[in-house]
Image (cartoon, grey):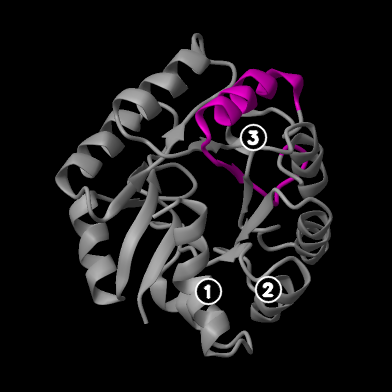
């Protein structure tokens, strides 16, 4: 079954993580597990040029998104540069990494840029105090025209997973990506309670392996149409492929 990976990285994550992957290894992995395309960012907000080089090398396989820190100088100009001039298709935010609450006012210029450019915003979800689903929902509420993807849909905490589903059900511009979220039953729940087009398969390479993330979808209890939607159709629709 063909797939789109809605969230992965290239680069080196040292320190506590000690994981890394380069574009050649990622594409090899994609080929092995029938992943047609990957929505890709770097290891941080300074690696966007590496993602651009990967995109140039594999333009039919990579969908690049620009990783930004709202505290950077000229961050809005950076977003416009990568999206308008380099072909990037979305924005990646990581409140935990950069120590800001997900509904901080500092994000308003970035969200306005996303609205103006017509691109989705992918935001890390599931770690207190910065990246909790309630805060992401407040951000999405302020910008109802921007599609906001909760990456990890609460991650490993059951309360945050439940809240991610509840917030997405409340706000139609919130989408869910399931990498790192351990409960396969919640994929099925999100599919029926949030919307059949608003839950997506992802891997979060190099942190997780495709075999683990694929099995979570396969054991979720969805029928073949549901599996096709989660694995491929929903990300394809989100990114206007």
Q: Using the numbered discs, state the Cα–Cα distance from disc 2 to disc 3 in whole angstroms.
A: 26 Å
The residue labelled by disc 1 is: 229
Q: Mark 1 or mark 2, which has the lower sequence index?
A: 2
Q: Which mark is residue 80?
A: none
Q: Residues within 10 Å of mark 2 (few under 14, many from 20)?
A: many
Quick check: 87 above or below 173? Answer: above
Q: Residues within 10 Å of mark 1 (few under 14, many from 20)?
A: many
* Dot 3 and dot 1 residues touching (CB under 8 Å): no
Residue at image point 62% right, 44% down = 147
Quadrant location of the C terminus in the rendered image: bottom left
Residue 74 at what x, y percent from top left?
49, 10
Residue at image point 59% right, 21% down = 70
Q: Using the numbered discs, state the Cα–Cα distance from disc 1 to disc 2 in whole angstroms.
A: 9 Å
Q: Residues within 10 Å of mark 3 (few under 14, many from 20)?
A: many
Q: Which mark is residue 191?
A: 2
Q: Mark 2 or mark 3, which has the lower sequence index?
A: 3
In the rendered image, which quarter is residue 232 located in? bottom left
Residue range (magenta): 104-130
Residue 134 at what x, y percent from top left?
83, 46
Residue 226 at what x, y percent from top left?
57, 81
The mark closer to the camera, 2 or 3, is 2
Quick check: 168 above or below 230? Answer: above
Helix, strand or loop at mark 2? helix
The residue labelled by disc 3 is: 95
* Dot 1 and dot 2 residues touching (CB under 8 Å): yes
Quick check: 17 above or below 136? Answer: below
Helix, strand or loop at mark 3? helix
Q: Using the numbered discs, state the Cα–Cα distance from disc 3 to disc 1 in whole angstroms.
A: 28 Å
């Amino acid at each position: 079954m063909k797939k789109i990976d809605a969230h992965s990285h290239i680069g080196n994550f040292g320190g506590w993580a000690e994981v890394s992957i380069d574009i050649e290894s990622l594409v090899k992995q994609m080929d092995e597990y029938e992943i047609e395309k990957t929505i890709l960012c770097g290891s941080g907000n300074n690696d966007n040029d590496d993602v651009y080089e990967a995109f140039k090398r594999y333009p039919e396989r990579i969908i690049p998104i620009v990783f930004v820190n709202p505290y950077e100088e000229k961050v809005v100009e950076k977003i416009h540069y990568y999206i308008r001039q380099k072909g990037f298709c979305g924005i990646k935010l990581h409140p935990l990494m950069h120590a800001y609450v997900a509904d901080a006012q500092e994000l308003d210029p970035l969200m306005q840029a996303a609205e103006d450019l017509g691109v989705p915003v992918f935001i890390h979800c599931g770690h207190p105090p910065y990246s909790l689903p309630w805060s992401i929902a407040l951000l999405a509420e302020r910008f109802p025209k921007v599609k906001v993807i909760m990456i990890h849909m609460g991650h490993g905490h059951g309360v945050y997973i439940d809240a991610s589903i509840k917030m997405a059900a409340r706000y139609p511009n919130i989408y869910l990506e399931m990498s790192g979220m351990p409960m396969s039953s919640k994929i099925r729940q999100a599919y029926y309670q949030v919307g059949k087009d608003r839950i997506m398969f992802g891997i979060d390479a190099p942190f997780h392996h495709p075999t683990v993330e694929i099995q979570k979808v396969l054991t979720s209890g969805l029928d073949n149409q549901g599996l096709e939607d989660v694995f491929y159709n929903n990300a394809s629709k989100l990114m206007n492929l």
